[in-house]
């Protein structure tokens, strides 16, 4: 009985590990695809990493400022989800 339980636990642990690995692969794929599209859309393929990070930081600041300026829109968006 104890051996059977131990075997089930090991099997579940293996499944969890496989799912974690699958998740990591999917996240990496998403990051590659999203990053590629970002670089294409903003014509950054031939820019340095520092220039790309500057664009990202600028976009982030702009996004966060616009989000703070229109809190009513955020509430409206939350209700639609």
Image (cartoon, grey):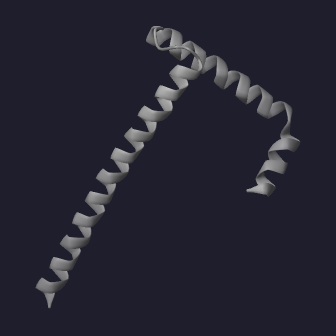
Q: In the displayed structure, does residue 26 sit left or right of residue 42?
A: left
**Residue projecting furthest to the left:** 3
- In this view, 51 is above or below 66: above
Query: Residue at image x 50%, y 33%?
Result: 34
- In this view, 50 is above or below 73: above
Q: In the displayed structure, does residue 79 sit left or right of residue 21?
A: right
Q: In the displayed structure, does residue 68 sit left or right of residue 14?
A: right
Percent position of residue 41, x then y: 58, 22
Query: Residue at image x 79%, y 28%?
Result: 66
Query: Residue at image x 53%, y 21%?
Result: 40
- In this view, 17 is above or below 54: below
In terms of depth relative to the viewer, which is nearer, 71 or 34?
34
Query: Residue at image x 77%, y 52%?
Result: 78
- In this view, 59 is above or below 25: above
Percent position of residue 43, x then y: 55, 14
Work out which quarter of the rendered image holds the C terminus and state it: bottom right
Percent position of residue 29, x then y: 39, 40
In terms of depth relative to the viewer, which is nearer, 66 or 48?
48
Could you tell me how many numbered marks the image carries? 0
**Residue projecting furthest to the right:** 72
Q: Quadrant of residue 4?
A: bottom left
Work out which quarter of the rendered image holds the N terminus and state it: bottom left
In terms of depth relative to the viewer, which is nearer, 55 or 38?
38
Percent position of residue 61, x then y: 69, 22
């Amino acid at each position: 009985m104890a051996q059977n339980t131990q075997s089930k636990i090991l099997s579940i642990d293996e499944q969890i590990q496989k799912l974690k690995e699958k998740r990591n692969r999917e996240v990496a794929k998403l990051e590659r695809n999203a990053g590629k599209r970002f670089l294409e859309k903003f014509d950054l393929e031939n820019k340095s990493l520092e220039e790309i990070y500057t664009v990202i930081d600028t976009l982030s600041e702009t996004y966060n400022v616009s989000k703070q300026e229109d809190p009513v829109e955020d509430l409206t968006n939350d209700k639609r989800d």
